[in-house]
Amino acid sequence: MALLEVNDLTVKFYTQEGVVTAVDDLSYRIERGEKFGVVGESGAGKSVTALSLMRLIESPGRIESGEILFKGEDLLEMSEEEIRDVRGNEIAMIFQDAQTALNPVYTVGEQIAEAVRHHLDYDDEEARERTIQLLDTVGIPEAESRYSDYPHEFSGGMQQRAVIAMALSCDPDLLLCDEPTTALDVTIEAQILEELESLADEFDTAIQLITHDLGVVAEVCDRVMVMYAGSPVEKAPVEELYYDPKHPYTVGLMSSIPRVGDRRERLQTIPGTMPDLVELPPGCSFHPRCPYAEDVCTKREPPLLNPETGRDASGTDAERAAACLEYTGELQEGLDYEVEIREGHDTRADATAPNPEGDRR
Ligand code: SF4
């Protein structure tokens, strides 16, 4: 049994502008100890998916349908009390902005110790010891003396380490990380990702890592799901995604992976922006931005298929899936791009981006 199995999840927001389908019929699974990446631009539905797992979708949002099986039990069927127990004890979440997760009026140590006391039923002394140990584990030097520091006395990187320590304090089975390193500089980002990965291995914790950056996914994850406008457009083991991406949106994301030390605006090679989720373009919702779009793409919504066999791949068991009419055989011209893996950048790949003007290579 998978640790987490999400089946046909649909989440809508009833706004004044209209109904926003933030997540549309989404299915995926995460095994115990696995590191699973969810990638896409903002508005793709990544964070809404994570908040749904914690049952933290608030009005005007609503989980419309689907099931979220965690260790075989549907989180959507649980009482408030049961879900509170799962939240924090078995599923923990780390947000992008560590500052908002830490209370400025308590010391960092007190806050983590409080979480330890709450989740593990330790007394004060045991909680303090466990906290110091955790701070040390996440790489905070002189953990004992830093226990009494207030959050503002920590750098951004140290704050994020403290938040990771707090999330790990209850030894969760699943850690949801929402852009955990976006606010940090690249060197610290690399250190924290490494730390996160080895801690997950040590604690046998599965990770759902949400990011807009495929470079980050390459460093940490085993499998990846790429999302666009609330739906998955590609799923693959991480290496396959890098060496052989099957969806034009993934290719666009890959060609915008920044190099170390390169702070260029990301995603610059995908023209245009995410569509208005109230009124998605007809057919393939990526068609206004896709350099390979043909007439049929404006009329037919591509199903998630195995790109090799053309068979249905919408279920949680599908290892490899892509949603493009190329795999239904309906594209006349086909997809024509090359992926060039640059030496010295390990898994950071360069896609030879298709020319948006239609001048294909
Ligand atoms: S279906 Fe058409 S528009 Fe959508 S990704 Fe494939 S080629 Fe592009």
Image: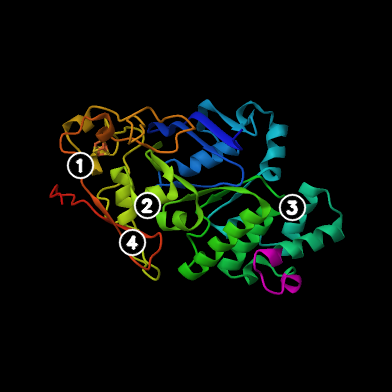
Question: Badges 1 and 2: C-beta atoms under 8 Å apart?
Answer: no
Three-letter code, disc 1: Tyr
Q: Residue 300 in the image: state x and y as whole percent.
A: 25, 27
- Image location of residue 217, percent across then percent down: 46, 54
| Badge number at residue 292 | 1
Mark closer to the observer (1, 2):
2
Q: Residues in magenta?
A: 135-146
Q: What element carries label 2?
A: helix
Q: Which element carries disc 1, helix, strand or loop?
A: loop
Closer to the camera in the image, 314 or 93: 314
**Mark whose residue sits in front, 3 or 1:** 1
The quadrant the N terminus occupies is top right
> Element type at marker 3?
helix
Ligand 1 picture quarter? top left
Q: Which of marks 1 and 2 is nearer the N terminus?
A: 2
Q: Which of marks 1 and 4 is nearer the N terminus?
A: 4
